[in-house]
Image: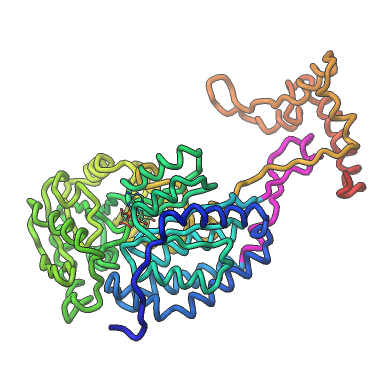
Amino acid sequence: MGAVEIPPLQYTPVEEIQSHVSTARKTFNAHKTRDVEYRLVQLRKLYWSVKDHLEEMREALRLDLGRPKFEAELGDTNWVLNDIIFVCRNLENWVKDEKAENIDITFKLMNPKIRKDPLGCVLVIGPFNFPFQLTLGPVIGAIAAGCTVVVKPSEKSSHCAVVIQRIIEAALDPEAYIVVQGGVSETQALLAERWDKIFFTGSANVGRIVCKAAATHMTPIVLELGGLNPAFISRNADPRLVARRLLWGKTLNAGQLCTSQNYMLVERPILPAVVEEFKKAYSEFWPQGTKKDFSRIIDDASFQRIKRMVDNTKGKILLGGTMDEKERFIEPTLVQIDSINDSLVTEESFGPLLTILPVDSLDEAIEIANGVQATPLALYPFGTKAEAEKILSQTRSGGVSINDASLHIPTLEFGGVGESGSGAYRGKASFDVFVHRRAITTSPGWVESALAIRYPPFGKKQDFFIKAGSLTPDFDRNGQKLRLGWLRYLLTLGGGSAKSGVTRATIVAAVAYFALQLLDRRGSRL
Ligand code: NAD
């Protein structure tokens, strides 16, 4: 028993769900969350609420996942705090209208810009594995973007779900940010509602259910799913680095990490050294055995699923392999397999299983990985720069850490591709994913004579207008770029043929010059 008490999770009655959604929707429609200062105040209050609940968060992570304190701070508590500060520091810049680039000179008169409009009332569905980071992370982005949010934490990490609700309810506007608790029935009741975006993190199977529900209302979705992530270990890799980094990547949170490698394709010449280094790293990381400083599997069903994968393997266990059902403990287990159809690689292990498949060459490794899943969430090449580039150029994945495990996640925007998901978030991307880029032009009354060319009756004037406005290609019919294409472009100012270009360029330039002068003088008056 820890120092703080966390009450059991109470599901939200299904019949109340609709009214919660309608509250969030009404608040958005009242334009309350559009004000940027309001958003900042909510985020700042959220920060302090997280601070006030740190002990409960650590305890909940210990109870649900047996998470060591350092990993609780690294992957959840500190992560969320830093996320909020980063967003608060940058929000005023992110919300600014963007001037449109590369627009035809005529349209410059219309002050074209992009406004970052909040999408509306959004649903966030969280997973169990990094419950605070992966549930509050999208919520932070949605608040920053000016959306109202209904959030459904995972019922599997039930203590964390309770603490998420406490954090939100202690800090945030209850009319705009609402927690709904529950499992399948409650989530399905939520999915039956109309949303302006659904942000889902979880398995591909449930992702499909989300997609179908979203289709009913044509709701845009973000899917943050799992993947059968490969690591490529070339004969030129440093075996010690490979072992330390990939052992960490597959044992953080006991391998319940969507970006952890599901299998390692190791070139045969380096295989003995890699295995040796895994053994060394193992004893260096856990000199007193892995029962200390090591997370537990989330529930019995997941424990049994991972156990089945190990029971059914035709591979050879090289390290670890012990399990304790009562504690839901699975020791980091290194297994060498000889077929990509082995039970250890045909599904996402989401546990501390380190599977090695020896290969003869990088070409073979690439072919195997592309056959297992063409679009995993992450991919890890170890070897020379040239080898990493070769792998990048012949594969696809949501993200890549070269020479490491999972390090692109805290650094960059994060998301999958194809079967591993769509949409990305983190940092500025968390804001972007919840805004609509609304295109706005303003046509001043005084340019009416210039714009009147579009009205009938049509005649020669319009023919001239179309010709003058046509761009000149700087490429030929064979798709080859023309030499001195830029000179043609300049002579014609992008319009018509080079022959008539100089006169036309002069006219267009003069008109544009005077129009811009006039615009400057008249300032922002319409
Ligand atoms: P899950 O799909 O079982 O559950 C996710 C959420 O969906 C939970 O809130 C749950 O209540 C809800 N849910 C479950 N069954 C449902 C149903 N039938 N209908 C409607 N809602 C339902 O996922 P999980 O076990 O929490 O997480 C593990 C999976 O998530 C792994 O596949 C992992 O790779 C993936 N994951 C991906 C990311 C990422 O960012 N890409 C992060 C974490 C986890």
Classify the position of the N terminus by image quarter. bottom left
Left or right of 223: which side holds 295? Answer: left
| Residue 32 rendering spot, x and y as whole percentages | 66, 59
| Residue bounds of the magenta highlight | 90-115
Is residue 234 positioned above or below 255 on the image? above
Dividing the image into 4 quarters, which one contains the C terminus?
top right
The x and y percentages for residue 434 are 55, 52
Q: Quadrant of ligand 1?
A: bottom left
In the displayed structure, 461 sits above or below 291; it is above
Residue 388 shows up from this direction: no
Using the rendered view, name the quadrant where residue 431 is placed: bottom right
Q: Which of 72 and 250 is in front in this view?
A: 72
In the rendered image, the vertical position of residue 7 relative to residue 129, given as above or below? below
List the single residue furthest toward the front.
15
Q: Is residue 480 left or right of residue 35?
A: left
Left or right: residue 78 versus residue 460 is: left
Residue at x 37% of width, y 43% of height: 393
User: Where in the figure is residue 146, as x and y percent of width and height?
Assistant: 61, 57
Residue in the picture at 70% in, 44% down: 100
Residue at the outermost bottom position: 3
Instruction: Identify whether 52 is placed above or below 130.
Output: below
Task: Decide which of 489, 83 is in the foreground and name it.
Answer: 83
> Residue at position x 36%, y 83% from top?
4
Q: Confirm whether the magenta stretch covers residue 401.
A: no
In the foreground, 1 or 256:
1
Q: Nearer the viewer, residue 371 or 238?
A: 371
Where is residue 305 shown, x and y percent of the image?
A: 17, 56
Residue 106 covered by magenta stretch: yes
Residue 262 appears anywhere in the view: yes
